[in-house]
Image (spheres, rainbow, N blue to C red):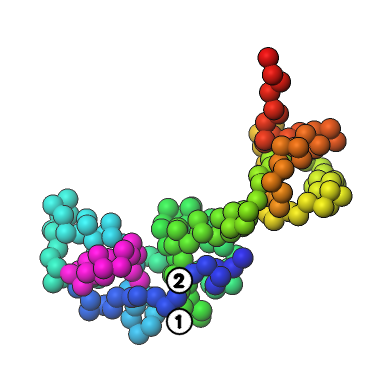
Protein backbone atom coordinates (compact mmCIF):
# COMPACT_ATOMS: atom_id res chain seq x y z
CA UNK A 1 0.00 0.00 0.00
CA UNK A 2 1.38 3.38 -1.05
CA UNK A 3 0.90 6.90 0.24
CA UNK A 4 -1.19 7.73 -2.85
CA UNK A 5 -3.70 5.06 -1.77
CA UNK A 6 -4.36 6.73 1.60
CA UNK A 7 -3.61 10.44 1.15
CA UNK A 8 -6.37 13.03 1.07
CA UNK A 9 -6.72 15.05 -2.10
CA UNK A 10 -7.38 17.80 -3.06
CA UNK A 11 -5.76 19.68 -0.19
CA UNK A 12 -7.11 22.78 1.51
CA UNK A 13 -4.19 25.18 1.81
CA UNK A 14 -3.24 28.57 3.17
CA UNK A 15 -1.25 31.21 1.32
CA UNK A 16 1.49 33.43 2.68
CA UNK A 17 -1.05 36.25 2.97
CA UNK A 18 -3.66 34.19 4.84
CA UNK A 19 -4.40 35.41 8.35
CA UNK A 20 -4.61 33.47 11.58
CA UNK A 21 -8.30 34.33 11.67
CA UNK A 22 -8.84 32.75 8.27
CA UNK A 23 -6.93 29.67 9.37
CA UNK A 24 -9.02 29.43 12.54
CA UNK A 25 -12.20 29.57 10.48
CA UNK A 26 -10.99 26.65 8.34
CA UNK A 27 -9.99 24.61 11.37
CA UNK A 28 -13.39 25.17 12.95
CA UNK A 29 -15.47 24.62 9.82
CA UNK A 30 -13.78 21.43 8.61
CA UNK A 31 -12.17 19.89 11.69
CA UNK A 32 -8.69 20.19 10.19
CA UNK A 33 -5.66 19.81 12.44
CA UNK A 34 -3.01 20.67 9.83
CA UNK A 35 -2.99 23.13 6.94
CA UNK A 36 -0.10 23.41 4.46
CA UNK A 37 1.03 26.91 3.58
CA UNK A 38 1.94 27.30 -0.09
CA UNK A 39 3.67 29.88 -2.21
CA UNK A 40 3.08 29.49 -5.92
CA UNK A 41 2.04 25.87 -5.40
CA UNK A 42 5.18 25.03 -3.40
CA UNK A 43 4.85 23.99 0.24
CA UNK A 44 6.69 26.49 2.44
CA UNK A 45 5.15 25.76 5.83
CA UNK A 46 2.65 23.89 7.99
CA UNK A 47 0.21 25.43 10.44
CA UNK A 48 -1.34 23.14 13.04
CA UNK A 49 -4.24 23.81 15.37
CA UNK A 50 -1.71 23.61 18.20
CA UNK A 51 0.48 26.27 16.56
CA UNK A 52 -2.55 28.50 16.26
CA UNK A 53 -3.64 28.05 19.87
CA UNK A 54 -0.14 28.79 21.17
CA UNK A 55 0.39 31.81 18.91
CA UNK A 56 -2.78 33.47 20.16
CA UNK A 57 -2.42 32.52 23.84
CA UNK A 58 -0.80 34.28 26.79
CA UNK A 59 1.97 31.64 26.73
CA UNK A 60 3.36 33.25 23.56
CA UNK A 61 5.88 36.03 24.27
CA UNK A 62 4.00 38.32 21.91
CA UNK A 63 0.48 36.94 21.40
CA UNK A 64 -0.74 37.32 17.83
CA UNK A 65 -4.13 38.51 16.67
CA UNK A 66 -6.58 37.20 14.11
CA UNK A 67 -5.35 39.72 11.54
CA UNK A 68 -1.71 38.58 11.73
CA UNK A 69 -0.38 36.44 8.86
CA UNK A 70 0.02 32.69 9.29
CA UNK A 71 3.73 33.06 8.57
CA UNK A 72 4.20 34.24 12.16
CA UNK A 73 2.96 30.95 13.58
CA UNK A 74 3.64 28.26 10.97
CA UNK A 75 6.49 25.73 11.03
CA UNK A 76 8.88 26.16 8.13
CA UNK A 77 10.75 22.85 8.50
CA UNK A 78 8.38 20.72 6.44
CA UNK A 79 8.90 17.01 5.87
CA UNK A 80 7.07 15.61 2.85
CA UNK A 81 6.19 12.26 1.28
CA UNK A 82 6.12 11.05 -2.30
CA UNK A 83 2.90 9.46 -3.64
CA UNK A 84 4.79 6.20 -4.24
CA UNK A 85 6.31 5.95 -0.76
CA UNK A 86 5.09 2.87 1.14
CA UNK A 87 2.71 3.88 3.94
CA UNK A 88 4.93 2.16 6.52
CA UNK A 89 7.85 4.41 5.53
CA UNK A 90 5.63 7.45 5.97
CA UNK A 91 4.48 6.16 9.36
CA UNK A 92 8.10 5.68 10.45
CA UNK A 93 8.96 9.27 9.50
CA UNK A 94 5.94 10.67 11.33
CA UNK A 95 6.70 8.61 14.45
CA UNK A 96 10.41 9.46 14.50
CA UNK A 97 9.78 13.18 14.08
CA UNK A 98 6.61 13.24 16.21
CA UNK A 99 4.55 14.98 13.57
CA UNK A 100 0.89 14.52 12.72
CA UNK A 101 0.95 14.82 8.94
CA UNK A 102 3.03 14.72 5.79
CA UNK A 103 2.23 16.87 2.76
CA UNK A 104 2.50 14.70 -0.34
CA UNK A 105 4.41 16.26 -3.22
CA UNK A 106 4.96 15.00 -6.74
CA UNK A 107 8.07 16.83 -7.86
CA UNK A 108 7.34 20.25 -6.39
CA UNK A 109 3.55 20.04 -6.73
CA UNK A 110 1.39 19.46 -3.66
CA UNK A 111 -0.94 16.57 -4.54
CA UNK A 112 -2.21 15.39 -1.15
CA UNK A 113 -1.77 15.18 2.59
CA UNK A 114 -1.32 12.12 4.81
CA UNK A 115 -2.37 12.30 8.47
CA UNK A 116 -2.14 10.01 11.46
CA UNK A 117 -5.82 9.15 11.02
CA UNK A 118 -5.15 8.09 7.43
CA UNK A 119 -2.44 5.75 8.72
CA UNK A 120 -4.89 4.23 11.21
CA UNK A 121 -7.29 3.61 8.31
CA UNK A 122 -4.42 1.95 6.43
CA UNK A 123 -3.66 -0.28 9.44
CA UNK A 124 -7.31 -1.35 9.67
CA UNK A 125 -7.24 -2.22 5.97
CA UNK A 126 -3.90 -4.06 6.17
CA UNK A 127 -5.06 -6.18 9.10
CA UNK A 128 -8.17 -7.34 7.27
CA UNK A 129 -10.65 -5.76 9.67
CA UNK A 130 -12.76 -4.48 6.78
CA UNK A 131 -13.97 -8.06 6.18
CA UNK A 132 -15.62 -10.63 8.46
CA UNK A 133 -12.59 -12.43 9.86
CA UNK A 134 -11.26 -14.21 12.93
CA UNK A 135 -7.97 -13.46 14.65
CA UNK A 136 -5.24 -15.98 15.36
CA UNK A 137 -1.82 -15.31 16.86
CA UNK A 138 1.07 -17.76 16.72
CA UNK A 139 4.66 -17.69 17.97
CA UNK A 140 6.87 -19.07 15.19
CA UNK A 141 10.50 -20.05 15.43
CA UNK A 142 12.70 -17.49 13.67
CA UNK A 143 13.97 -19.79 10.95
CA UNK A 144 13.28 -20.43 7.27
CA UNK A 145 10.20 -22.47 6.46
CA UNK A 146 8.10 -21.70 9.53
CA UNK A 147 5.86 -19.21 7.80
CA UNK A 148 5.46 -21.56 4.86
CA UNK A 149 4.48 -24.35 7.28
CA UNK A 150 1.79 -22.09 8.70
CA UNK A 151 0.35 -21.06 5.34
CA UNK A 152 0.37 -24.65 4.07
CA UNK A 153 -1.53 -25.68 7.21
CA UNK A 154 -4.21 -23.11 6.41
CA UNK A 155 -4.34 -23.99 2.72
CA UNK A 156 -4.76 -27.71 3.52
CA UNK A 157 -7.87 -26.80 5.52
CA UNK A 158 -9.20 -24.45 2.83
CA UNK A 159 -8.86 -21.46 5.17
CA UNK A 160 -8.27 -18.15 3.42
CA UNK A 161 -5.72 -15.79 5.01
CA UNK A 162 -6.91 -12.19 4.60
CA UNK A 163 -3.93 -10.59 6.34
CA UNK A 164 -0.71 -11.61 8.04
CA UNK A 165 1.50 -9.41 10.21
CA UNK A 166 4.69 -10.39 12.01
CA UNK A 167 6.66 -8.88 14.85
CA UNK A 168 9.87 -10.10 16.53
CA UNK A 169 9.36 -11.00 20.19
CA UNK A 170 11.86 -10.62 23.07
CA UNK A 171 12.11 -14.42 23.42
CA UNK A 172 13.49 -14.76 19.88
CA UNK A 173 10.28 -16.01 18.29
CA UNK A 174 8.24 -14.20 15.68
CA UNK A 175 4.71 -13.35 16.75
CA UNK A 176 2.47 -13.79 13.74
CA UNK A 177 -1.06 -12.38 13.67
CA UNK A 178 -3.45 -13.71 11.07
CA UNK A 179 -6.92 -12.64 10.03
CA UNK A 180 -8.60 -15.66 8.46
CA UNK A 181 -11.88 -16.17 6.68
CA UNK A 182 -13.32 -18.56 9.24
CA UNK A 183 -15.60 -18.14 12.23
CA UNK A 184 -14.25 -21.35 13.75
CA UNK A 185 -11.14 -19.83 15.27
CA UNK A 186 -11.13 -21.95 18.44
CA UNK A 187 -11.36 -25.38 16.71
CA UNK A 188 -8.79 -24.13 14.24
CA UNK A 189 -6.49 -23.09 17.08
CA UNK A 190 -6.81 -26.50 18.70
CA UNK A 191 -5.92 -28.19 15.41
CA UNK A 192 -2.89 -25.93 15.16
CA UNK A 193 -1.79 -26.88 18.68
CA UNK A 194 -2.13 -30.54 17.73
CA UNK A 195 0.18 -29.80 14.80
CA UNK A 196 2.73 -28.33 17.27
CA UNK A 197 2.11 -24.65 16.62
CA UNK A 198 2.53 -22.38 19.63
CA UNK A 199 -0.85 -20.64 19.48
CA UNK A 200 -1.06 -17.48 21.59
CA UNK A 201 -4.65 -16.58 20.66
CA UNK A 202 -7.32 -17.72 21.11
CA UNK A 203 -6.42 -19.16 24.49
CA UNK A 204 -7.15 -22.83 25.13
CA UNK A 205 -10.69 -23.49 26.29
CA UNK A 206 -10.58 -24.17 30.04
CA UNK A 207 -11.56 -27.63 31.17
CA UNK A 208 -14.81 -27.75 33.18
CA UNK A 209 -14.38 -28.26 36.91
Percent x, y of residue 105? 48, 76
Percent x, y of residue 58? 13, 52
Q: Residue at x 39, y 75 (%)?
A: 11
Q: Secondary structure at mark 1?
A: strand
Percent x, y of residue 179? 67, 50
Please say if the residues under marks 2 and 1 sit with CB atoms less than 8 Å apart. no
Query: The C terminus lies in which quarter of the figure?
Result: top right
Question: Which residue is tagged 1?
Answer: 109
Question: Which residue is tagged 2?
Answer: 8
Label 2, residues with CA under 10 Å away: few <14, some 14-19, many ≥20: some
Q: Quadrant of residue 67?
A: bottom left
Query: The N terminus lies in which quarter of the figure?
Result: bottom right
| Residue 21 part of the magenta segment | yes
Question: Can residue 152 be seen in this snapshot?
Answer: no
Helix, strand or loop: magenta stretch: helix
Q: Residue at x 84, y 48 (%)?
A: 157
Q: Earlier in the sequence, mark 2 or mark 1?
A: 2
In this picture, residue 15 sits left or right of residue 43: left
Q: Residue at x 67, y 31 (%)?
A: 203
Camera-nearest residue between 184 and 65: 184
Question: Can residue 95 be seen in this snapshot?
Answer: yes
Q: In the displayed image of the protein, which residue is found farthest to the bottom?
A: 40
**On screen, residue 144 above or below 6:** above
In this picture, residue 158 sits left or right of residue 206: right
Q: Residue at x 68, y 23 (%)?
A: 206
Camera-nearest residue between 208 and 99: 208
**On screen, residue 193 above or below 93:** above
Spatial CA span between label 2 and label 1: 14 Å
Magenta residue span:
20-36
Amino acid sequence: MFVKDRMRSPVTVLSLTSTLGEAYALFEAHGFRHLPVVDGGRVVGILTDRDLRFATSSFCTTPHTASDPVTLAMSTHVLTADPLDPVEDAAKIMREHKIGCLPVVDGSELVGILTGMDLLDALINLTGLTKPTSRLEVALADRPGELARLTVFMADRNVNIHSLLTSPAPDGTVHTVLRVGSNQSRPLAEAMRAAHFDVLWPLPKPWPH
